[in-house]
Every structure is written in structure tokens, then in C-alpha cells.
Amino acid sequence: MTFNFDKIISRQGTNALAEDGYENYLFGASSAEPLNLPSGDLISMWVADMQFAAPDAAIDAVRKRLEHPIFGYTMNFDDQLYDAFGAWCERRYGWSFEREQMMVSLGVIPALFALVEYICNPGDKVLTLTPAYGYFKHAAVQQDRELVTSPMRECANGDYEIDFDDFERKVSDPSVKLFFLCHPHNPTGRVWTENELRKMAELCFANGVRIVSDEIHCDLTRSCVRHVPLAKLFPESQDIITCMAVSKTFNLAGMMVATVIIPDETLRTVWKSRNYPFINPLSLAAAVGAYQDGEAWLEELRVYLDSNFEFLRKELSAKLPLARFKVPEATYLAWVDLSAYFDSSINLTRFFLENAGVILEGGEMFVDNGAQRIRLNLASPTHQVQAALDKIRDAILNRADAGTTQTLMSA
């Protein structure tokens, strides 16, 4: 490989959420029960950014911008970002859009909050599939809006499918005005098929429901999987808002920059009049540099992630044989069912921190359908993934539950 994804890079002391901020984020600043942290170093496998250096394409672009000594108020005035991002979407997805449709946001999450406010009135409802990323709920319930969930069905092999009967019932509620689609899906890693996308969208359109399609993980499919932007399937629709970002793709989450494609002119006018328009000049440079010259890095990263997922699959099969896991079609996040080893009363986030020294997110951190699951971030050097899995296995083996332990030891 040209790029070194095996290098361990400590982030301590950089105010990184992954290592410096986990305690407050996962457990709250004033937890009623103090954490019993183990001795030794902790392994971070939780928040969805990478333990890899960002690509030189982004870093070099920032360095070049630093040569100019003024860092004043900055907005996306010129066409550099549109040209770079538009070419990226055309090349990778065969999807194009007009320059005036592309808005810039300080991230996909801020865009979700803004779009709920701009589209929904107090008392309106927002629909999403579950299990769901927690910020979908946070964005939906602001200012007297309500979140409505359509639980997905879990298959015997650990995959997930949409319950379209339930989805149709929920989307038919006249109070539902907006559908948050996560595509690819977090935390399950599903990449929706064209048939699934068309069916969801057509049900939304038939009921006057707009769609915000969060496609932030779109560049991180497995090597054999193809992502299709929802808006590509409905090029004439004014009711699909697409959110993408360099943050997940190139490990630039802290740069706080995302693109929001809004076809509807009226909604764009609202966005322009109410949304914060400024952007960090270094973020703009990093995004342009990554989209222009970061593709080779991304392709090697995808191969490395494929290998990490295959490693995880084999390790779970050999060492935690009762765990249910299917390699996700996208993302660098593994969604693992540990219901054979834990009942729903156990807070898995806390259990694995205190008993394994591994910072991860238990299913209780997500919206519905997450009990007895864990989400593991595999965007880490393989030997770090292995060390974490060994600690996770040992923690399960050492549990006081003799029945579970005996089952595991005899497997």
C-alpha cells in the first residue's frame, strides 16, 4: 500500500472527542454513578471519525492556504468547491446538480437541525427508520416537533430490511412532513437498493412528505458495493434534499464543512436568509483539496477497511461464536448483536469501558432497536482492532454469569 494505515497516532491532548471527550459525551458531566476506569490505556472505538491521518491532499491544501496570512470572514463565493465536489459526484455516482442548488453547512448535523426548522411547523412530525443515529432524534424533536419511528426487521443473518407495511402506515400520518433517510444507514451499514429507495420515496411523495437524505457515508461502501444517490433516481423532484460531506470520507470531521443540495428554490431562499453562511477558510481549502486529489487515498482506505471487517468477522466467528454480525455494505462501523451474552438490563457502553478498557457505543446510545448491540469503529489500525477484540472477549469471559461463560468456553 502507498498509504500507511497501520500507524498508531495518539490524539490525547488535542481536544479530540474520541479520546479526551468520551466521558462527558457518553455518560454525562454529572453521572450519578462514578465510572470505575481500568488501569492502563483505553482503546477508542466509538465516535465515527478515523484513527488515521487525513490524506496529504487535504493537509497540503491547508498548508498552502496558511501561506496567506489573513484568515478573515469567509464564504463559499467562488466555484472551487462546486467544481471539485461536482466532479467527484459525477465521476463516482454519475450524478450532477446545478451550482445554485449547492449550499454549504457547518456539518450535516447542523443542516438537519436547520432543515427541520425550515420545513416543519410546531406539532409536525419527522419520520425515520430505526435503529437510528441519535442526532436524528435530537434534530427532530426541537421546538415542539415529534419523531416518529419505523422499526426495521432484523434478519437471521444479522442484516436489516424495511418493514414497508409499517413505513406506509407511518408516512401516511398527515402530521408527518419530513423523512430523515440515512443512506448508507448508520448504524446497520445497509446500502439501500434502487427498488427500496424508489419505494420509500414514492410513498413519501404520495403523502406530501419531503426527504432529507443523509448520504455522509456514501463514499465508504465495501469495494463490491455501489451507492446510488436518491436524488439521482428522481432528477425532477424538488422534495429531496441531499447532505454529503468530506468529513467521514477523508477524516475531516473537525473541519465542520458539508454540502447540502436543495433543488427547491423557495427552500433555498429560506436557507440563505436564515442559515449561518460563513465557513472556516482552512476547511474550505481542505475540502477542495480532498475532492480534487484524495481519491487514491480513499481507494486504499476502502481496501484496508474491507480487510478489517473480514478480520472482525473471522474473530467473532472463532472467539464469540454466539455473536450475530454481518459485514456492512458501507461505513466503517460494525453493528454487533451480543444478545446471546447479555440481557437488556446491561449498559454495554459502560460495561466494556469498565471491564475491557474499550470505549465503544452500546445500542442504548441509538434510537430504538439497539438493545444488546454494540457499534465498533473499525477505522483503526488492524492491530488496534485486534487488541480491542481481545479485551472485549476477555471481559465477556470474565463475567459473573456462569451460564454465559460456560457456553462461550465450550464453543
Image (cartoon, rainbow, N blue to C red):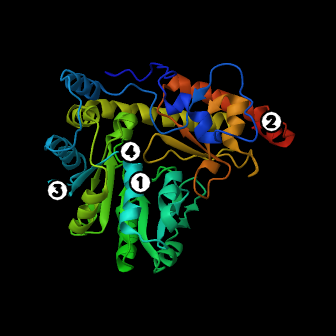
Disc 3 residue type (three-letter): Glu
- Tell me the CA gap for discs 2 and 1: 36 Å
User: What residue is at 79 percent from the left and 36 percent from the top?
Assistant: 410
Label 3 or label 2, whichever comes before in sequence order? 3
Disc 2 residue type (three-letter): Arg
Label 4 or label 1, whichever comes before in sequence order? 1
Disc 1 residue type (three-letter): Val
x and y percentages locating residue 119 in the rendered image: 36, 67
394 vs 137, left or right, is right
User: What residue is at 60 percent from the left and 24 percent from the top?
Assistant: 387
Considering depth in this image, is 278 or 167 the residue closer to the camera?
A: 278
- Tell me the CA gap for discs 4 and 2: 36 Å
370 above or below 238? above
Q: Alpha-carbon neighbours of circle 1 within 10 Å: few (<14), some, or many (≥20)?
A: many
User: What residue is at 20 percent from the left and 46 percent from the top?
Assistant: 91
Find disc 2 in the rendering and name its residue.
399
209 above or below 384? below
Find disc 1 in the rendering and name its residue.
191
